[in-house]
């Protein structure tokens, strides 16, 4: 049974804050009148929901990079696969309301002269099936990839390059029209989700609340995993893999578990992202997207639970501001941010604060201990020889 002892106070506080946000933001948007100073604008609700989806993605990367030492440069692939699974469900819900009014085939299939629905689109008219694929497809791909990579003991920069090659290969594949996923245009023009209009303010608010709650659940789950005996073994593999193997542990099994779980989390993030943004296309597989996730995690502080969430929110909030205020400078800002963090804040924001707090606490304890020794010496002088 999972108790607060296995979750950690920071995870509990963060999860509680996210649940509070899941209630207050939709309530502010739906209950307050337009123009009220405390009302969250309509356009801001899906934007904040997108940020929270990114926070789930950053947390998934932190599970493998921060706690197991696997720097994945291809986590955007799992995010995009989960997004495509949800997008396929949303496309099947359009039915005869599409441009070509075909009750079975999506518009792009009619345009490309498809005669029947491809076999891999079967079942996506049901939400439960799409939700299952959101978990299964990224998880299965990560399991198969990790099984061969970790069994072959591919580590370090070589593993990072292979993960980047994986997402680039998927990018090229999904760009093809004959793959059956909309080619360059991807999947868009969604109408409904679970029978509710995806453009309605109440639906957008519900999607935001669902994203915040899922993030809170993942925060608790990651905290429980990393504070357990398995979590200690994950850190041991990260810090001393050879010694861990020498003691009899199968490091590849630990890596495979963390990598697969992380991919499932990324897939869920993609599934929550798509209905709020309204589109999914092969651009989500771009290697640059996966590198940005690394930046979010590094800025916030890898090996912490709060860090990747904070990093994703701060960097993407800055991105929204700078792409509007100075669009030609955003990439330079992002690159400079990563360089500054790498050189001056290698532990990230949260990691640096934690390290400074621990150092300050140790100095205070040492000062109190020294003061105590001095007081004892003064009150109990040693006998004269």
Image (cartoon, rainbow, N blue to C red):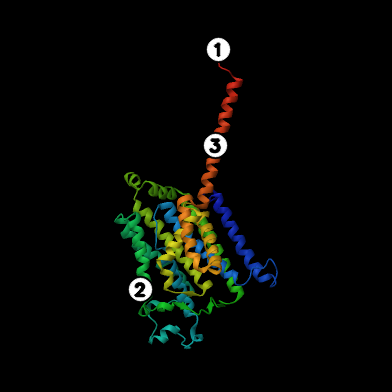
Residue 353 lies, with reference to residue 141, above or below; the image says above
Q: Residues within 10 Å of mark 1 (few under 14, many from 20)?
A: few
Residue 101 in the image: x percent, y percent?
A: 48, 88
Farthest residue, direction top:
385
Q: Residues within 10 Å of mark 2 (few under 14, many from 20)?
A: some
Query: Quick check: marks 1 and 2 in contact, CB under 8 Å?
Result: no
Please count the marks in the image: 3
Q: Which mark is residue 363?
A: 3
Q: Earlier in the sequence, mark 1 or mark 3?
A: 3
Q: What residue is pinned by disc 1? A: 384
Query: Quick check: marks 1 and 3 in contact, CB under 8 Å?
Result: no
Q: Which mark is residue 101?
A: none
Q: Earlier in the sequence, mark 1 or mark 2?
A: 2
Label 1's element? loop
Residue placed most toward the observer, 157 or 153? 157
Query: Image point 51% across, 45% down: which residue?
Result: 355
Q: Earlier in the sequence, mark 3 or mark 2?
A: 2
Q: Quadrant of residue 199?
A: bottom right
Q: In 3D space, how far apart are the residues under numbered discs 3 and 2 (Cα atoms)?
A: 57 Å
Q: Quadrant of residue 170?
A: bottom left
> Which mark is nearer the camera, 3 or 2?
3
Q: Residue 104 vs residue 10: left or right?
A: left
Query: Image point 47% across, 80% down: which residue?
Result: 92
Residue 334 in the image: x percent, y percent?
A: 48, 61
Q: In 3D space, how far apart are the residues under numbered discs 1 and 2 (Cα atoms)?
A: 88 Å
Residue 353 in the image: x percent, y percent?
A: 54, 48
Residue 243 in the image: x percent, y percent?
A: 34, 44
Q: Quadrant of residue 48?
A: bottom right
Q: Which mark is residue 173?
A: 2
Label 2's element? helix
Query: Quick check: marks 3 and 2 in contact, CB under 8 Å?
Result: no
Query: Image point 61% across, 62% down: which residue?
Result: 21
């Amino acid at each position: 049974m999972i108790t607060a002892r296995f979750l950690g106070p920071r995870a509990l506080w963060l999860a509680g804050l996210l649940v509070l946000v899941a209630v207050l933001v939709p309530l502010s948007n739906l209950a307050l009148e337009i123009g009220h100073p405390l009302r969250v604008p309509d356009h801001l609700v899906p934007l904040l929901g997108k940020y929270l989806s990114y926070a789930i993605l950053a947390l998934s990367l932190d599970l493998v990079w921060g706690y197991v030492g696997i720097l994945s440069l291809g986590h955007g692939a799992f995010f995009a696969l989960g997004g495509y699974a949800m997008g396929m469900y949303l496309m099947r819900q359009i039915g005869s309301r599409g441009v070509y009014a075909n009750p079975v085939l999506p518009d792009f299939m009619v345009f490309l002269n498809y005669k029947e629905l491809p076999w891999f689109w079967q079942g996506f008219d049901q939400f439960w099936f799409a939700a299952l694929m959101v978990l299964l497809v990224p998880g299965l791909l990560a399991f198969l990839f990790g099984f061969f990579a970790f069994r072959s003991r591919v580590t370090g920069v070589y593993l990072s390059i292979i993960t980047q090659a994986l997402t680039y290969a998927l990018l090229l594949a999904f760009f093809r029209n004959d793959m059956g996923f909309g080619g360059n245009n991807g999947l868009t023009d969604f109408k409904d989700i679970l029978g509710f209009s995806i453009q309605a303010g109440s639906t957008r608010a519900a999607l935001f609340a669902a994203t915040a709650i899922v993030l809170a659940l993942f925060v608790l789950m990651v905290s429980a995993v990393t504070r357990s005996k398995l979590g200690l073994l994950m850190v041991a593999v990260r810090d001393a893999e050879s010694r861990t193997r020498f003691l009899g542990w199968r490091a590849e099994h630990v890596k495979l578990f963390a990598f697969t779980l992380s991919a499932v989390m990324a897939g869920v993030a993609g599934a929550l992202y798509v209905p709020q943004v309204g589109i999914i296309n092969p651009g989500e597989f771009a290697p640059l997207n996966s590198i940005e996730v690394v930046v979010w995690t590094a800025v916030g502080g890898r090996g912490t639970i709060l860090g990747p969430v904070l990093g994703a929110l701060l960097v993407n909030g800055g991105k929204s501001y700078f792409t509007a205020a100075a669009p030609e400078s955003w990439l330079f800002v992002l690159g400079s941010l990563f360089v500054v963090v790498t050189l001056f804040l290698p532990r990230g924001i949260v990691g640096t604060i934690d390290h400074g707090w621990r150092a300050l606490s140790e100095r205070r304890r040492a000062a109190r201990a020294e003061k105590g020794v001095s007081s004892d010496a003064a009150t109990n002088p040693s006998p004269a020889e």
